[in-house]
């Protein structure tokens, strides 16, 4: 039974005394919320299924010949690529034509790519992986496990993620009631070791069955508030009441925020990702005006498991999904700049893994490891590709696959990327290894990605 069913079945409680002395507007001055202009939000878009980075960020120099030779029918024509200005990490680059809006943001200096990034236990080469002389993350090439690994999963005894752990270790002055937020059941990244994860649906959680949280004096709204205050001696019942009470408090905060929100200015596509980012863009300025300091948002989207029919115009092809991604993300950036949050919001993507350089049967590609991600926002050191770009040679120096299918060992750890982002959020240096324990094996703990 879900919470809506509970109320539909005729729950009737004595009238409570409203939402207490604070009411809806009183939530804006809860302890831990300090008026400040120092607001920073980190937004992660996880591309489900394993986006093919080999057809996302492509070299336009001599390395293009290796790419074209290895990719056969999947290779993008060189003259179709959206040009990235300049020479970076020894290459000139282009993007899939569907990502042209992102090329514009890159060329404006607001977006950077991170090349060949993925989960690592310690630095590793393809030869070491082949020789089994170095520790590697468990369950490589598995969707669910690599989704969790990218987001900082520490194993069955600690399911938390790196952003959730980091948010718990921020200074008290940077904390606020709604700090780690997800839009679906995927929550590893924002899950802490002892704190809550908040769920934010598109437009908020105003209605709980018959209760309208925007009208706190009505019968059902007072009833649900009374329910959240129940006391139990039984530990299980007490935990249920505590969790319910926390969910109601978060829903009241979100209700207040969305009531104050204004339509963002970006030209968002009318689809799931566009709707999610439009909703988030509308409410971020409100959170800043409420005095919130640090927030992390996790959005999951996509179906990039393109074992076949990767190219084309069908809605599940990579080509079509990259078009959707670029339009939604560029509109999100436009909205943040227009609302004065251009320096305050950093958006980045991750995905389960990349895909084989060598095409699979059926004009698709199979599961791989190292991938190319991007980070976007005014605080990003944009207009560059960070890290090391792999050799696009089947069986080459970066290919650990025994059949030479083009599976690259990452040269930048997802933990190094995460550390760079969370230090921008305010993570103290002395907490770095408690959040990213594998970084003890790396001499370089972060990458040159963020300003300030």
Image: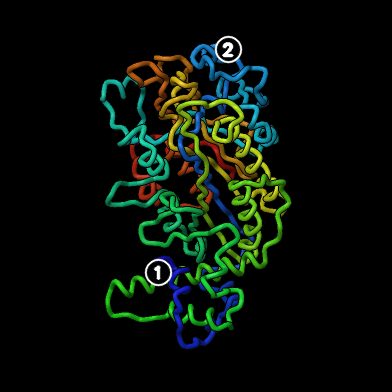
Please identify, in this view, whether the residue under mark 1 or under mark 2 is nearer the observer. 1
The residue shown at (40%, 16%) is 397
The residue shown at (65%, 35%) is 102
Q: Is residue 156 left or right of residue 376?
A: left
- Residue marked by disc 2: 62
Above/below status of 300 relative to 16: above
Q: Circle 2: is it few (<14), some (14-19), or many (20+) Cα within 10 Å?
A: few
Above/below status of 372 relative to 13: above
Q: Position of residue 272 (x, y in %)?
A: 59, 48
- Residue marked by disc 1: 243
Q: Are marks 1 and 2 in contact (CB under 8 Å)?
A: no
Residue 405, which numbered label?
none
Identify the element where label 2 is drawn.
Answer: loop
Q: Circle 1: is it few (<14), some (14-19), or many (20+) Cα within 10 Å?
A: some
Q: How many marks?
A: 2
Above/below status of 15 relative to 325: below
Q: Is residue 42 left or right of residue 106?
A: left
Q: CA distance from mark 1 to mark 2?
A: 57 Å
Q: Position of residue 46 (x, y in %)?
A: 50, 43
- Residue 216: quarter of image: bottom right
Q: Quadrant of the N terminus?
A: bottom left
């Amino acid at each position: 039974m879900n919470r809506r069913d509970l109320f539909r079945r005729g729950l009737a409680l004595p009238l409570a005394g409203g939402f207490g002395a604070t009411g809806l507007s009183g939530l804006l001055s809860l302890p831990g919320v300090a008026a400040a202009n120092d607001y920073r939000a980190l937004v992660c878009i996880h591309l489900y299924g394993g986006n093919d980075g080999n057809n996302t960020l492509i070299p336009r120099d001599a390395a293009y010949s290796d790419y074209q030779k290895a990719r056969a029918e999947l290779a993008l024509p060189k003259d179709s690529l959206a040009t990235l200005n300049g020479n970076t990490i020894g290459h000139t680059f282009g993007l899939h034509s569907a990502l042209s809006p992102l090329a514009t943001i890159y060329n404006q200096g607001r977006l950077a790519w991170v090349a060949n990034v993925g989960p690592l236990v310690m630095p590793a080469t393809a030869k070491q992986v082949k020789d089994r002389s170095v520790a590697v993350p468990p369950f490589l090439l598995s969707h669910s496990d690599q989704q969790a690994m990218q987001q900082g999963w520490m194993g069955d005894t600690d399911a938390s993620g790196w952003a959730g752990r980091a948010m718990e270790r921020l200074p008290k002055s940077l904390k606020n009631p709604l700090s780690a937020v997800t839009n679906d059941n995927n929550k590893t990244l924002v899950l802490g070791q002892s704190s809550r994860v908040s769920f934010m649906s598109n437009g908020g959680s105003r209605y709980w069955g018959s209760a309208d949280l925007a009208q706190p004096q009505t019968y059902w709204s007072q009833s649900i508030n009374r329910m959240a205050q129940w006391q139990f001696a039984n530990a299980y019942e007490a935990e249920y009441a505590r969790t319910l009470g926390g969910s109601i408090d978060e829903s009241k905060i979100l209700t207040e925020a969305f009531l104050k929100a204004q339509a963002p200015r970006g030209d968002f596509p009318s689809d799931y990702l566009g709707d999610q980012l439009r909703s988030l863009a509308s409410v971020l300025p409100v959170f800043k005006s409420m005095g919130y300091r640090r927030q992390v948002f996790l959005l999951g989207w996509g179906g990039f498991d393109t074992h076949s029919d990767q190219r084309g115009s069908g809605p599940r092809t990579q080509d079509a999904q990259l078009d959707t991604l670029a339009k939604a993300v560029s509109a999100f950036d436009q909205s943040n700049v227009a609302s004065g949050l251009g320096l305050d919001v950093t958006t980045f993507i991750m995905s389960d893994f990349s895909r084989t350089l060598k095409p699979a049967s059926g004009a698709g590609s199979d599961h791989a490891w190292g991938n190319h991600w991007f980070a976007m926002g005014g605080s990003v050191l944009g207009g560059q590709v960070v890290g090391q770009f792999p050799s696009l040679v089947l069986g080459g120096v970066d290919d650990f696959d025994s059949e030479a299918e083009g599976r690259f060992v990452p040269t930048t750890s997802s933990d190094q990327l995460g550390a760079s982002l969370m230090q921008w959020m305010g993570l103290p240096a002395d907490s770095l290894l408690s959040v990213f324990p594998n970084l003890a094996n790396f001499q370089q703990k972060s990458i040159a990605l963020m300003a300030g």
